[in-house]
Image: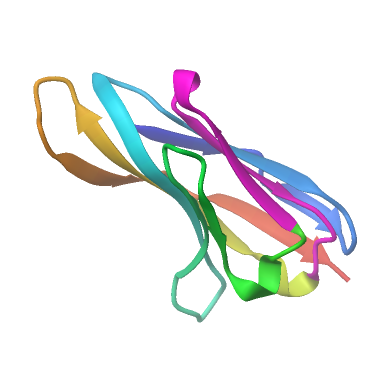
Amino acid sequence: QLQASGGGLVQAGGSLRLSCAASGDIFSVNDMAWYRQAPGKQRELVATITSGHSTWYKDSVKGRFTISRDNAENTVYLQMNSLKPEDTAVYYCNAAVIRLGQSFSLRYWGQGTQVTVSS
């Protein structure tokens, strides 16, 4: 249902752009979000965006990361600038999806994409 891409290896100060597309028998997609999980740590919420494009960011990424979405393509993006070694993690997208014929949303996870920032 959710396919993430765009991770990779980058030097500190560099940039990466993650994408995550929802597919299938979709009626609509409500909130979309990016999480990350570093080795030995719990998964944490990084940024969220509503269908109306309201956003929220974790304090440590404010001013460096930008979440956006294309509602027509059911796709969410995470532009990551000024990357730091502590941003190294597997990044997961998450979305609340209403499928055709349903009146409620279910949350789905993407498969995760590795982001590694070298110092």
Residue at (33%, 33%) from the top-left corner? 29
Relative image position of residue 8 (x, y in whole percent): 72, 48
Residue 93 in sight here: no
Task: Identify the magenta region.
Answer: 65-84
**In the rendered image, the vertical position of residue 117 relative to residue 39, given as above or below:** above
**In the rendered image, the vertical position of residue 115 relative to residue 44, given as above or below:** above
Residue 57 in sight here: yes
71 in magenta: yes
Relative image position of residue 55 (x, y in whole percent): 54, 52
Residue at (78%, 63%) from the top-left corner? 117
For the N terminus, give its image quadrant.
Answer: top left
Relative image position of residue 74 (x, y in whole percent): 44, 26
Residue at (50%, 80%) from the top-left corner? 41
Look at the magenta stretch and give its main secondary structure.
Answer: strand
| Side of 20 relative to 14 (left or right) | left
| Side of 29 relative to 101 (left or right) | right
Residue 68, quarter of the rendered image: top right
73 in magenta: yes
Relative image position of residue 7 (x, y in whole percent): 66, 46
For the C terminus, give its image quadrant.
Answer: bottom right
| Side of 1 relative to 100 (left or right) | right
